[in-house]
Image (spheres, grey):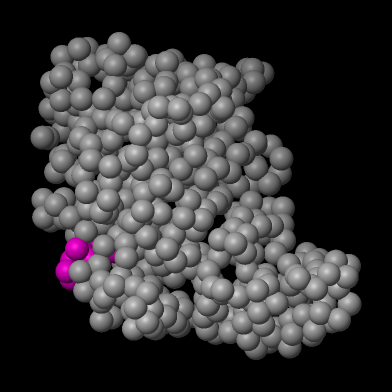
Amino acid sequence: MNKENRIHSAALRSKVMSANEAASLIQSGMNVGMSGFTGSGYPKAVPSALAKHIMDANLNGKRFKIGVWTGASTAPELDGALAMVDGIEMRLPYQSDPTCRKRINAGEMEYIDIHLSHVAQFVWFGFLGKLDVAVVEVAGILEDGRLIPSSSIGNNKTWLDQADKVILEVNSWQSAQLEGMHDIWYGTQLPPNRQPIPLVRSSDRIGEPYLRCDPDKVIAVVETHAPDRNSAFSPPDANSKLIAGHILEFLQYEVKKGRLPRELLPLQSGVGNIANAVMAGLNEGPFENLTAYTEVLQDGMLEMLKSGKLASASATAFSLSNEALAELNADLARYRERIILRPQEISNHPEVIRRLGVIAMNGMIEADIYGNVNSTHVMGSQIMNGIGGSGDFARNAYLSIFMTPSQAKGGTISCIVPMASHVDHTEHDVQVLVTEQGLADLRGLSPKQRAKTIIENCAHPNFRPALSDYYKRALQFSPGKQTPHLLDEVFDWHLRALRGERM
């Protein structure tokens, strides 16, 4: 399939128009569901054209804002362009754009940070209001109107089902060989009519390779030829390698104790350099015939597929560097048999995660001495990106692992603190904490036992004495002894950091 013949439906071919014409169909006050997940498969032309319409309206003294719903983060051409012209009234469920973040933290943009598995069902339930328009990138359109999904699926199935009107971007830059990689399950029902999801192995295919869309809802089709935003990853640094080494040693121990099979259980890994370092360690480690059931497929997992260490990988999107993407596209026909892209309501579904027994590995901003984890807010009030799917996996995983360097900001801030300034994952959902200093296995430990283990194993030596001193005084002076705290000083470290002092 080449650039000239990606649209095989005569009915939808008749609706082809420019991005500017399509953008003019979106009105202020609408809720717009956009495709896209970590810089893959997002619409490339309509959002930028819409930003120009919004800018013109602003110059004429007219307030023009929309609600923007996506799968997860997108790219500067979408989030950045719309945020730059102050065109977003409400954003959900996850973002990583600097301009968005600045506006959210300045109180200029509303933001709902939602577990990624919840978004589709919240829309089906009507909790978020009416979805007026869907703007979805696809790789092609078949004669019968079925859609070949792009490099991410995210919430696209739900957007196409629930939106009153649909704008399709057909991107001929996306490889035609993506066709057949996707698995779209159309068994979603509302309570009380829900049925079990028939997925018992991470490599199972339970749906169909195409998205469906009522052609009467399609109001515009825009042809594009533009690349995804691909994230470059730095080589693993010394701390990342140490963290990866601790996790690898722990997994080997769990196999030895008989708590994990030799091929482990399906792997889930968050986005970032530490996650890629863990994958690199597994690629060089003793485990064979591994599988993945995760949100995004990064460079590290692609390397494991290439080496044969990883037998199969299930995700909802790619998040690859330019080099890794070129490698994928060069051999996509072979990779397609071992990679499955699913809607995020399935890739992140608690029922499936629990059934498969996923090993979840996610990053964090800070953890406190009792194992409560903050993965979203800096100093308690400033959003970084969002919870994403980490909560979906942490609450339901066979093993829930959170990892971070032990200190940040050049060693001026400890990532292990007396009390987390914001909590996304309570101590009940956190089984293992890992820093470059070591690993704290918190399973079966009481709060006081957790505190001693975390301080001894995960805190940086520069901060360990202060944490130990705080804990000893809390044991003595806290009115309650189950989870001892000194409430008049639990946030002293954060307050000093806000004043520019060392924590």
Nearest the viewer among 139 and 249 is 249
* Prevalent SS, magenta region: helix
Side (left or right) of 38 relative to 225: right
Quick check: is 305 in the magenta stretch?
yes
Q: Position of residue 462 (x, y in %)?
A: 68, 87
Nearest the viewer among 480 and 420 is 480
Residue 127 seen in render? yes
- Quadrant assignment, res 10: top left
Residue at (16% x, 29% y) in the render: 6
- Quadrant assignment, res 414: bottom right
Q: Position of residue 272 (x, y in %)?
A: 44, 63
Q: Is residue 162 above or below residue 183?
A: above
Q: Position of residue 248 (x, y in %)?
A: 38, 79
Residue at (48% x, 51% y) in the render: 392
Residue at (76% x, 67% y) in the render: 494
For the record, the magenta segment spans: 301-311
- Quadrant assignment, res 303: bottom left
Q: Is residue 140 above or below residue 154?
A: above
Nearest the viewer among 314 and 365 is 314
Side (left or right) of 5 relative to 324: left
Quick check: is 213 in the magenta stretch?
no
Residue at (70% x, 83% y) in the render: 463
Nearest the viewer among 172 and 139 is 139
Figure quadrant of the N terminus: top left
Q: Is residue 401 above or below residue 101?
A: below
